Image: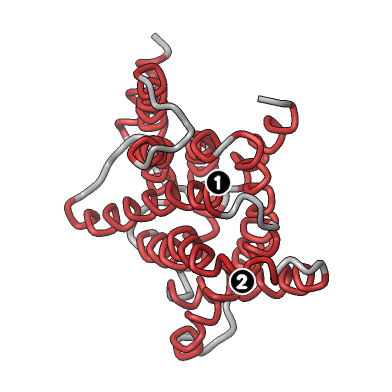
């Protein structure tokens, strides 16, 4: 990987480890529908004028079906499911479950005859990475949380499919145009329900900060960096950042939200040090 690739990889590993904390904070006062709407509307307000001024929207028109497909699997559906799941799951556990993305992405790429080779060594590396994340965070799920776990599982599938669509169907399109269009479409789709579910009182400063950071840093900026990373290292390698996101999610969840370190996590960490 080039130096540029490593810089993009490191930036995304941190930036996309933060949303789990921010979503957990936001859903304390906002419905998942409202949160998705605010996140995408603010992100669209930032990127759409830039994309329009650069002429980055018109090239998308012949590929509108693939842009909509990408929007559905990467933004519209996953962000709702993730927000809904975090009403019951801890932010750190959610981060762990998302770490299945690289393995799912590798399998999908192989099944659809992509360019990324899937040999035994690569499979072993992906599986070991997933096990390592599980050892760090710990997997402690009750029966009542199975629905939320299923939601995050669907998110992982979408997050694996999104980069593949970009790499195969939209590689020549301007990233800012694709991202802006995705955010606009999602915001418009969620607007009718979101406007009915707005809170009666102004959300707390903590929630407003969480939504603003989600929209500006973890959405508008992050997607531009992610498209650059996909172009640099390919769709499967780009999703390996999800092996590092849980460490950030765990650190933030424990220190800022006082989420417990599970017994499984502590035992595994102790065992790895022996």
Q: Is residue 71 above or below residue 99?
A: below
Residues at badges 1 and 2 in contact (C-beta under 8 Å)?
no
Measured as percent of width and height from the top left, residue 233 is found at 61, 34
Q: Point out the tag, 1 or 2, that comes first from the N-terminus.
A: 2
- Extreme top residue here? 274
On screen, residue 187 versus residue 56, left or right, reads left
Residue shown at the point (44%, 38%) measured from the top left: 114
Secondary structure found at label 2: helix
Residue shown at the point (67%, 61%) measured from the top left: 220
On screen, residue 4 versus residue 89, left or right, reads right
- Extreme front residue here? 62
Measured as percent of width and height from the top left, residue 271 is found at 35, 16
Secondary structure found at label 1: helix
Q: Which residue is mark 1?
A: 167
Instruction: Using a 10 Å C-alpha cutoff, classify the residue at mark 1 as few (fewer than 14 neighbours), some (14 to 19) or many (20 or more).
Output: some
Q: Pick the quarter of the image with the N terminus.
A: top right
Residue shown at the point (63%, 67%) measured from the top left: 60
Q: Is residue 111 above or below residue 172?
A: above
Residue shown at the point (39%, 8%) measured from the top left: 274
Q: Which residue is mark 2?
A: 61
In the figure, residue 148 lies in which quadrant?
Answer: bottom left
Q: Nearer the viewer, residue 5 or 250?
A: 5
Q: Is residue 32 above or below residue 235?
A: below
On screen, residue 70 versus residue 149, left or right, reads right
Residue 209 in view here: no
Measured as percent of width and height from the top left, residue 74 is found at 48, 58
């Amino acid at each position: 990987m080039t130096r540029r690739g490593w810089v993009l990889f490191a930036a995304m590993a941190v930036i996309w480890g933060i949303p789990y904390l921010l979503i957990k904070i936001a859903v304390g006062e906002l419905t998942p529908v409202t949160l998705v709407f605010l996140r995408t509307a603010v992100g669209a307000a930032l990127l759409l004028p830039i994309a329009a001024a650069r002429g980055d929207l018109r090239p998308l028109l012949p590929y509108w079906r693939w842009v909509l497909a990408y929007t559905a699997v990467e933004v519209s559906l996953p962000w709702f499911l993730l927000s809904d799941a975090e009403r019951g799951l801890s932010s750190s556990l959610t981060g762990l479950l998302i770490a299945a993305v690289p393995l799912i992405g590798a399998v999908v790429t192989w099944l659809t005859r992509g360019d990324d080779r899937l040999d035994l060594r690569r499979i072993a590396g992906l599986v070991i990475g997933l096990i390592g994340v599980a050892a760090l965070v710990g997997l402690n799920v009750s029966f009542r949380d199975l629905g939320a776990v299923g939601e995050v599982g669907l998110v992982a599938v979408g997050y694996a499919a999104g980069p593949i669509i970009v790499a195969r169907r939209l590689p020549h399109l301007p990233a800012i145009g694709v991202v802006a269009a995705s955010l606009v479409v999602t915001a418009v789709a969620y607007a009718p329900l979101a406007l009915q579910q707005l809170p009666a009182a102004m959300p707390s400063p903590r929630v407003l900060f969480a939504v603003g950071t989600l929209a500006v840093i973890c959405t508008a900026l992050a997607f531009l960096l992610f498209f650059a990373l996909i172009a640099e290292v390919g769709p499967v390698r780009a999703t390996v950042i999800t092996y590092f996101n849980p460490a950030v999610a765990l650190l933030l969840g424990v220190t800022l939200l006082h989420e417990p370190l599970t017994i499984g996590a502590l035992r595994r960490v102790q065992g790895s040090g022996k």
